[in-house]
């Protein structure tokens, strides 16, 4: 590990859960497009994405000036793209930037600099940028940017208030939008000092609750009498989102909703098999009041013999979060069960049909990070820097929108696959696919044609042929399969071919016998297009 000073950039999408709930597929497609824009700006500005989760992005820059310039470029570019959509469907980022001392470990960055950037992102307006005083001092005389001083802000899990500034964003007519003022934390703070060149009358002060994703929070938990807690295997799991695709729906809401489902240790998601055994032996038979908390990286804790239900819930979350902090897990802990009733919105993440792992020597080959389908450069770098160095057993799952999740150092390939699919499914909101186990691709991954997604339908195939195509593909469980269609939708299939090129040639040849203008639309479990 090494320490360094860096400008930390944190961003996520405002109202992402609502957008996904209203139209999941359209939201995933748009987020993929928007992430491609943001990732490109970050790279061109000399930045490096070091962590992604769901719709969130964390990046480092060697210069605060470049970080702010990049953030402005991103917001203005996405504002233009949003003009094509009604207000209720617009997708806007909040961005926070600070300069801080961070620790670099395996390509990831940890420390107060990351925490504060995340909190500043939560203070930013929709489509806006919020920076720390250190960034403001570095940028004020170097960029033609206007700021609003919003004073000292009290943010969660940061012991001292953070002095923050809003960046004024240009409107289409060239004027500047006035940021809404956040309520300063210090009681003696004066009314924010607006530093606009234009005269601005402050109409009101709006108290806005601090929002944003919680990365690496630092909670201190006092000991409790009569309390028992158990942490699961907290081996790091990397979640990443492809720019060519998320991307992932936001994590389930923090507030659990009561369920009538009875607690069963063998169905608790995300946690390892050993943790399930402990829950079965120690938590399940214990008397109330008790609770279990977990996050989708598998960190968990439980408490028993508490004075009340509320005390049990609070203690379980605090213990779980303490374990998550120690493991540098980026996901927030939530209550999973109270007593013997499951109350979590996590529920049971969507999983694909079994078997999850199918070994086929004709399609298996060594894992190459750059060839992992759908995911973007940042997640692929995480595979190279973290996954390949991780101990077996391990697995990588990819979602239909480019979401990625992996676990390593598990007791068996089956456990690695199960936990990886559960974590990916919770992030993606839909079933993911295991693409690699240990250091080997376990699905046919195209390289001649470009993977564009996972087939969500077969509308390009003639209606009277679709059922037969599905049946034949389901029966061909090994080798390289491909589907081609022509102008009239007549399909051509290649089943159990020896390699990708043979599958392409056979599918095109069979299609050409029945149709014209044939092209390959799918190879293996992926839809494809020109490379």
Image: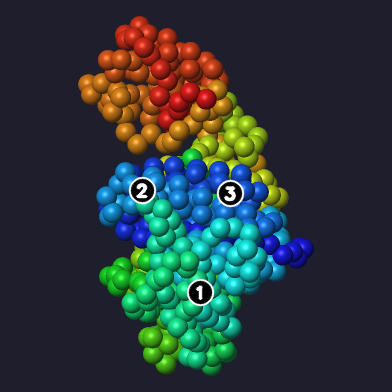
Could you give the CA–CA distance between mark 3 and mark 2, rounded to whole angstroms?
20 Å
Q: Which residue lies under the disc numbered 2?
A: 82
Element type at mark 1: strand
Horizontal side of 319 relative to 464 (left or right) equals right
The quarter of the picture where the N terminus appears is bottom right
Q: Nearer the viewer, mark 3 or mark 1?
A: 1
Compare marks 2 and 1 and give the one earlier in the sequence. Answer: 2
Write the residue at 45% across / 28% down.
528
Where is 270 relative to 527, above or below? below
Write the residue at 40% across / 24% down.
521
Element type at mark 2: helix
Decide if residue 88 is in sight here: yes
Characterize the local packing of mark 2: few (<14), some (14-19) or many (20 or more) Cα atoms within 10 angstroms: some
Q: Nearer the viewer, mark 2 or mark 1?
A: 1
Could you give the CA–CA distance between mark 3 and mark 1, rounded to whole angstroms?
26 Å
Horizontal side of 439 relative to 186 (left or right) equals right
Compare marks 3 and 2 and give the one earlier in the sequence. Answer: 3
Q: Which mark is residue 42?
A: 3
Where is 523 relative to 146, above or below? above
Write the residue at 34% across / 78% down.
204
Compare marks 3 and 1 and give the one earlier in the sequence. Answer: 3
Residue 132, position in %: x, y? 58, 70
Residue 72, position in %: x, y? 51, 54
Q: Which mark is residue 149?
A: 1
Q: Quadrant of residue 415?
A: bottom right
Decide if residue 121 is in sight here: no
């Amino acid at each position: 590990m090494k320490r360094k000073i860096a400008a930390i950039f944190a961003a996520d999408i405002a109202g992402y859960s609502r957008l996904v709930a209203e139209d999941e597929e359209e939201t995933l497609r748009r987020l993929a497009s928007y992430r491609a824009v943001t990732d490109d700006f970050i790279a061109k500005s000399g930045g490096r994405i070091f962590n992604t989760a769901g719709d969130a992005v964390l990046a480092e820059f060697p210069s605060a000036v470049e970080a702010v310039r990049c953030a402005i470029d991103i917001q203005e570019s996405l504002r233009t793209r949003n003009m094509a959509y009604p207000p209720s469907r617009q997708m806007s980022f909040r961005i926070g930037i600070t300069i801080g001392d961070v620790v670099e470990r395996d390509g990831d960055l940890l420390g107060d600099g990351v925490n504060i950037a995340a909190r500043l992102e939560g203070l930013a307006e929709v489509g806006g940028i919020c920076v720390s005083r250190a960034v403001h001092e570095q940028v004020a005389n170097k960029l033609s940017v206007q700021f609003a001083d919003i004073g000292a802000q009290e943010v969660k899990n940061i012991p001292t208030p953070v002095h923050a500034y809003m960046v004024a964003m240009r409107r289409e007519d060239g004027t500047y939008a006035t940021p809404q003022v956040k309520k300063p934390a210090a009681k003696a703070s004066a009314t924010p000092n607006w530093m606009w060149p234009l005269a601005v009358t402050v109409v009101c002060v709006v108290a806005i609750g601090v929002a944003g994703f919680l990365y690496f929070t630092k909670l201190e938990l006092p000991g409790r009498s009569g309390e028992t807690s158990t942490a699961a295997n907290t081996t790091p799991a990397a979640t990443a989102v492809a720019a060519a695709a998320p991307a992932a729906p936001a994590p389930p809401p923090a507030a659990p909703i009561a369920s009538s489902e009875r607690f069963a240790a063998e169905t608790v998601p995300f946690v390892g098999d050993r943790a399930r055994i402990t829950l079965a032996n120690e938590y399940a038979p214990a008397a109330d009041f008790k609770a279990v908390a977990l996050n989708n990286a598998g960190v968990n804790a439980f408490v028993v013999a508490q004075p009340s239900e509320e005390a049990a819930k609070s203690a379980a979350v605090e213990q779980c979060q303490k374990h998550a902090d120690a493991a540098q897990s980026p996901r927030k802990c939530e209550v999973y069960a109270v007593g013997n009733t499951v109350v979590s919105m996590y529920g049971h993440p969507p999983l694909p049909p079994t078997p999850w792992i199918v070994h086929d020597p004709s399609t298996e080959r060594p894992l190459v990070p750059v060839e992992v389908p759908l995911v973007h450069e940042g997640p692929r770098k995480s595979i190279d820097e973290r996954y390949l160095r991780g101990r077996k057993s391990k697995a990588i799952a990819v979602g239909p929108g480019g979401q990625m999740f992996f676990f390593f150092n598990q007791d068996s390939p089956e456990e690695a696959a199960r936990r990886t699919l559960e974590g990916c499914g919770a992030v993606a909101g839909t079933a993911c696919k295991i693409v690699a186990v240990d250091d080997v691709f376990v699905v046919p991954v195209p390289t001649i044609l470009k993977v564009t997604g996972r087939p969500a339908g077969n509308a390009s195939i003639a209606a009277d042929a679709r059922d037969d195509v599905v049946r034949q593909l389901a029966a061909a469980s090994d080798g390289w399969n491909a589907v081609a269609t022509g102008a009239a939708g007549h399909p051509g299939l290649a089943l159990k071919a020896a390699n990708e090129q043979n599958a392409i040639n056979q599918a095109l040849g069979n299609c050409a016998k029945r149709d014209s203008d044939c092209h390959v639309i799918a190879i293996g479990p992926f839809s494809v297009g020109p490379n």
